[in-house]
Amino acid sequence: MPKIVTFGEILLRLSTPGFQKIAQAESFDCTFGGTEMNVGAALVNFGFDVTHVGVFPDNHIGKKAKAFIRKLGISDKNIHLKGQRMGLFFLETGAVSRASQIVYDRADSAFVNLDPSWFDWEEILKDADWFHWCGITPAVGEKPAIALLEALKVAKKLGVKVSSDIYYRSNLWNYGKTPQEILPELASYSNVILASRKNIEEIFGIISTEEKGKFQDTAKKLMAQYESIEKIIDTERIQISASHNRMNARMWNGQEYLKTGNLDITHIVDRVGTGDAFLGGFIYGQLTYKDDLKSLEFGNASSALKHTIPGDQNLVDIAEVENLMLGDGSGKLKR
């Protein structure tokens, strides 16, 4: 059973009931979410052993969050209960032509104020097959960025595969550092990077001069700059409305450009966490199929199915994903 380690902040998610706007809500549905943990949750459902590393406040909310990830099947043995505050986000789910909206309230959280010395990465990553991080972690504070760099150095030393989602939430960088100062060094330790052409241009200053194939061009140039990077992947969302999207995925693997077909998602239930579902599916494919196109297709189908599930986590199993990959999107009742 592959061992996966994820590191990042988990937030208390407060969602308006149904499709209410925040302005009209008198109550909120409560759960937890966080991009790295969401990736891990998907992989638990695919049969992998997952440990999440992080910090929760030492209070009833922090203990509730620990219980939540245990319920998902994720190990909490490397979660520290320290500090006073859990980061929050408020979700207003859109419909038809009205977009969903998220409001963050995560400043000065227990995770932001972590001490990098709390984490024994040699022990945490011992026997691990894969380590996953995202660009939000170094965005929220200098201490998480230091801890992440230490983790990546140990992962490289131990030969652990590393994936990163470098979508970085520009409005979170408020501690005096810019993404351009921090993310390139972190990305240099990654083997797989989820990034769009725009991300690559903004973070690394790599500009495509091609009229067509700009993603491939920037991906080639990024891989030439960092020898550790083996694959660059991305998803493409064709947004017809807030309730109806089409999804595909693509990759440059150093030798060829691969792209999946579109999956039509006609009645979106919850879009949050769908990128994490893609990554969870892709990582599963890489460690199981060892085939790049099939990994992309499994990730894309995983993401499509997550759109049908309330909450941050993708809770589908392998058979459901493979069924959609085979073309069965009927949703026919199974008995």
Image (cartoon, rainbow, N blue to C red):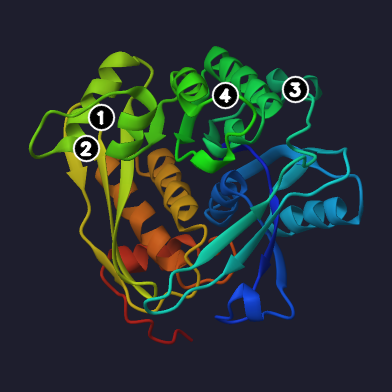
Q: Are discs 1 and 2 less than 8 Å apart at CB?
A: yes
Q: CA distance from mark 2 to mark 3?
A: 35 Å
Q: Is residue 188 left or right of residue 66?
A: left
Quadrant in the rendering for residue 210: top left
Going from N to C along the chain, the mark reached first, 2 or 3, is 3
Q: Is residue 125 left or right of residue 59?
A: left
> Which residue in the structure is indicated by mark 2?
215
Badge 2 element: helix
Looking at the picture, how far across and down is residue 251, in whole percent? 26, 40
Q: Which dot, 4 or 2, sits closer to the camera? A: 4
Q: Residue at x 23, y 29 (%)?
A: 218
Q: CA distance from mark 4 to mark 2?
A: 27 Å
> Which residue in the structure is indicated by mark 4?
177
Residue type pointed to by label 3: Pro
Badge 1 element: helix
Q: Residue at x 38, y 85 (%)?
A: 332
